[in-house]
Amino acid sequence: ERLDPWSLYRIKSTGHRVTLTSISEDGTVTVAVSAKFNYVLFERNVFGLDPSDLEPCELPSPDERVGCAMTSDQVEKNIDELRVGIRPDLFEMDSSGKAKRRGS
């Protein structure tokens, strides 16, 4: 089945509505998970998807909630906190509250 870059698809395994951004040489696809069509924690591109996990879908209904729960600044802060929390041996917070590699 041919995938069109102008169509909206649903990832069967997650339910997210996505748009196609690229097709890789190995046959997998990269898609954009957008707040325009979903209610998500943060917008992102997902790569390495099997095209068989995509199915055509309709636009969200007018009463369906869409948007982002986190701003891009909140996402960055969350990632920095995760880096330090998960790998304190590699990362530390600098004086501005940004995660930086230890020793750099």
Image (cartoon, helix red, strand yellow):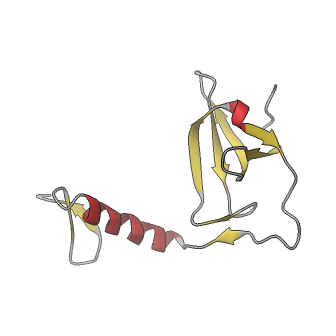
**Along the line of sight, the residue nearer the viewer: 14 or 46:** 14
Left or right of residue 18: residue 96: left
Query: Where 20 sits versus 52, above or below?
Result: below
Q: Residue at x 27, y 65 (%)?
A: 85
Please report the residue visible at 58 percent of the width from the left and 45 percent of the height from the top.
46
Q: Quadrant of residue 4?
A: top right
Q: Quadrant of the N terminus?
A: top right
In this orientation, does residue 32 appear? yes
Indicate left or right for 46 with 103 as reference.
Answer: right
Taking the view exactly as shown, the residue that stands out farthest to the front is 13
Q: Residue at x 72, y 52 (%)?
A: 15
* Residue 97 drawn above or below residue 27: below
Locate residue 47, reporting x and y percent: 56, 39
Q: Which of these two is toward me, 76 or 14?
A: 14
Task: Evaluate whether residue 6 shows in this view.
Answer: no
Q: How many marks?
A: 0
Residue 90 is drawn in which quadrant? bottom left
Judged from this view, the residue extending furthest toward the left is: 103
Image x and y of residue 79, in percent: 39, 64
Return the x and y of residue 19 as percentages of the image width and height.
73, 47
Residue 32's x, y, as percent?
A: 65, 49
Residue at position x 86%, y 74% from top? 63
